[in-house]
Amino acid sequence: MNQIIFNRRHPEYKANIAGWERARAAYSGGEEYIDSALIRHISEIDIEFAERRRRAYYFNYPRAIAQRITQYVFATEPARYNASTELVEDFDRAGHRTGEVMRQLSTMLNVYGRAWLWVEAPCFEGRKSLSEAKTQQLRPFCRALAPFDVTDWSYADDGKLQWAIVNERIYCNDDPFGEAFNVRRVRLYCRDSWKVLEATPAGIVEVASGVNPTGEVPLIPVTEPDGFGLFSRHWFEDVVRISEAILNNESEAQMNVVKQMFGMLVVSDAFFRGARQLAEREGSGFASTVARSAAIVESAEEKGISRYISPGGVASSVIRSENLALKKELYDVVGLAVQNQSREAQTAESKEWDFQNVCQFLTARADILEQAELSAWRLMQKFDPAVKVPELIYNRKFVVRDLTGAISGLLQLSTLSTQKEFAQAVEKTAAELLSAISPHGKAPISGNFSANNKQNKE
């Protein structure tokens, strides 16, 4: 058996792997990412760049954006009617609830534009009692996979997966007295079978195989249909680029502050020549490097006065202003600008447009996640007919308005007229507004809204 199956990479995988790795690094942040993202100036010497790199800090906007989208979508937990409590509480057979696994999928989708849901069931021989099955967790499970994990796949004429390869790196440390080691494996899933292959020093070995009872490849591809799904780059790459520009600008602003505190020495040319000659006669060193940490030499005709110079404060303020503009554009590109702009400075029409922009973005994301989870439940049922496919409802009403201001406005409107029709219209609007907070139940509002307000006024 040859190595081809271990080295196969889908064209989409090869085209996007660099962007995925960069997005993952930006999402992770930390010193390693700063070292890779910080740009060195052409005229910057080693010691200066080393100091700037040590001082650099990172505002992790990519992670904040990816997590914020997920938090908005799951601000209200999806309704899963008639779902197995055991599966809802442990969806991946590792202790994560269904909502947590779907949050993982959502964040992966934000960062990479592609992710997978993997549905499986443990293998066992013979018949098991209900108590044994429960104790050993012999039931289907579902896990979210990043695009790195599924290396190649193929679609059949019916538009469904014909086969797929899942790449695994397993850390084996079962024996506390033995040496720990890494094992490289791949899982090949076909519609009617599966097998696990392992790379060993002696070659490729098949360590397990079996029949696929579902008749489907148990992997659910999840992609964003806009942009990335149309064979273009994922929008998160632009987020990373803008974030890296902010990182580098902020690093420059920080070093400008340092330069203002610690100026650069300027000495006359005559002093410089005399000091160098003295150093050469005595065999001692003399700093002649042009840098912030060394001296600048000028001729006596120009100044002739030794002094310290430093950049003005204007340069730092300009950089900080540029960063504020970049941050605004960053959220605007993603579609979350409403959360970053002053509401007082916007007109009512502008606010409403922003709210609709964010809501439509989140609604589309909720639809993708709902369909993916529903497909996972259906696959689980094919592994185990006892698993019920729940009635699944993701929230489609997102409260992105200024709720306090909206309610305050309704209270003021209710005082303008005592006509019954007007009061009913106010009550209806209030009910619609507050029902967004509790979309799966009744709106927490009394039928005597105007009467209560009139009583309070009196």
Image (cartoon, grey):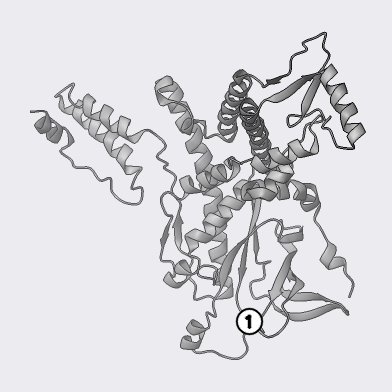
Task: From the image, tell me which residue sits under label 1.
Answer: 123
Tell me where residue 126 appears, x and y as whole percent.
Answer: 60, 91
Rendering quarter of residue 228: top right
Tell me where residue 183 appears, x and y as whole percent.
Answer: 75, 74
- Tell which of 324 and 381 is nearer to you: 324
In the image, residue 135 sits, relative to residue 117, either above or below, namely: below
In the image, residue 110 sits, relative to residue 133, either above or below, namely: above
Tell me where residue 295 appears, x and y as whole percent.
Answer: 77, 26
Q: Residue at x 56, y 90 (%)?
A: 127
Residue that sits furthest to the left in the current view:
458
The image quadrant where one finds the N terminus is bottom right
Rendering quarter of residue 255: top right
Can I make out residue 23 in this image? no
The image quadrant where one finds the C terminus is top left
Q: Residue at x 57, y 60 (%)?
A: 375
Residue that sits furthest to the top in the current view:
301
In the image, residue 209 sits, relative to residue 445, either above or below, namely: below
Label 1 neighbour load within 10 Å: few <14, some 14-19, many 20+? few
Q: Is residue 395 left or right of residue 301?
A: left
Secondary structure, mark 1, is loop
Can I make out residue 308 in this image? yes
Tell me where residue 36 appears, x and y as whole percent.
Answer: 74, 45
- Three-letter amino acid code at disc 1? Cys
Q: Is residue 310 left or right of residue 97?
A: right
Q: Residue at x 76, y 60 (%)?
A: 151
- Tell which of 334 and 54 is nearer to you: 54
